[in-house]
Image (cartoon, rainbow, N blue to C red):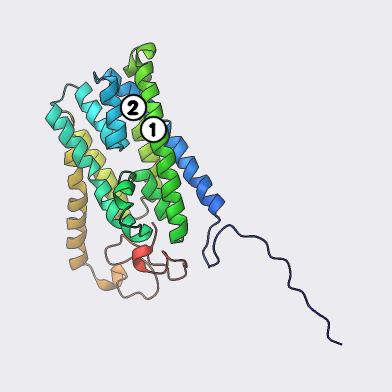
Amino acid sequence: MATEQTAPPQTPRETPSGLGGKPDAAVVRDALGVGIAVGLSGFAFGVTSAGSGLGLLQTCALSLLVFTGASQFALVGALAAGGNPFTAAAGAFFLGTRNAFYGLRLSQLLALPKALRPLAAQWVIDETTAVTLAQPTRRAARIGFTVTGATLYALWNLTTLAGALGARAIGDTDAWGLDAASPAVFLALLAPMLKTTTERVTAALAVVLVLALLPVLPAGVPVLGAALAAPLVLFLKGRGATTADPADTGATAPGPGPDPAGDAITDPGRSGEIGNSPKGQAR
């Protein structure tokens, strides 16, 4: 007599089935961690902006409309140093153009409806990009982007307001060194992403250029000069690649590894909607 077999109980899962999936709760936890940690540094911006001479409405408008910490700090820092407002605005603008390149990358990964893209564009910044690219599936990427963006936008603006209101109570803002808070957070997020020699050399050269140009150029301009680091390193690398022996560069080596430019890594073992194609490889 055949016995009826019952299927073993299934443990509920928080993500859709599929290899490389990540529990939704884990994505939300990571996104909240980044959003809260960085969002609190908006207090430093509020204090620094008020200390540079901007009013409460001007300070809050920068956070509401610009919403890219590095550019905001670059603007108020240049103004505080006595820089020309147009030069300060130009430096902040060009520093913020990196978000446009982030948008090109994220638009492919998130594949949001057209109606939502203008709203999502406001949240395309360093932190949301870092969290999104770290996810193995499109679902996880959308959750990470949304939670990070919403948390960071809300906290950044609230703490900006608090910082601007509390600037008078703090007194001399320069003595507290609060203007270094946002750059420190930015470097903490950037450092783990510098995985290749090309990226590390480019970052180091950018620092050298800024330090060299600070004494001779007006405030806000050295950061523009730092942008020359990337094309210079790529030019020198291209010249080296044309003269190097293929056997030394590993161009003929089989298997996964860096692409000829050395900037992307293809991992065929990674699964998920994003990870299956070279375009979707998170770095």
* Relative side of 208 to 150, left or right: left
Q: Nearer the viewer, residue 16 or 226?
A: 16
Residue projecting furthest to the front: 115
Tag in front: 2 or 1: 1
Q: Which residue was labeled with disc 1?
A: 156
> In terms of sequence position, does the residue under pointer 2 or pointer 1 come before the other?
2
Classify mark 2: residues with Cα within 10 Å, few (<14), some (14-19) or many (20+).
Answer: many
Q: Does dot 2 land on a helix, a strand or a loop? A: helix
Image quarter hosting the C terminus: bottom left
Residue projecting furthest to the bottom: 1
* Relative side of 86 to 270, left or right: left
Q: Amino acid at mark 1?
A: Trp
Question: Does residue 35 sit above or below 84 in this rendering?
Answer: below
Residue 68 appears in the rendering: yes
Q: Which residue was labeled with disc 2?
A: 45
Q: Could you tell me which residue is drawn at 31 percent across and 32 percent down?
A: 63
Q: Does dot 1 land on a helix, a strand or a loop? A: helix
Residue 177 appears in the rendering: no
Q: Could you tell me which residue is drawn at 33 percent across and 44 percent down?
A: 125
In three-dimensional space, the C-alpha distance between marks 2 and 1, rounded to whole angstroms, equals 9 Å
Image quarter hosting the N terminus: bottom right
**Residue 138, position as x, y percentages in the image:** 43, 60
Q: Could you tell me which residue is drawn at 33 percent across and 48 percent down?
A: 120
Do callouts 2 and 1 mark residues in contact (Cβ within 8 Å)?
Answer: yes
Q: Nearer the viewer, residue 281 or 43?
A: 43
**Residue 113, position as x, y percentages in the image:** 34, 57
Q: Amino acid at mark 2?
A: Phe
Question: Does residue 38 sit above or below 3 in this rendering?
Answer: above
Question: Does residue 82 sit above or below 142 in this rendering?
Answer: above
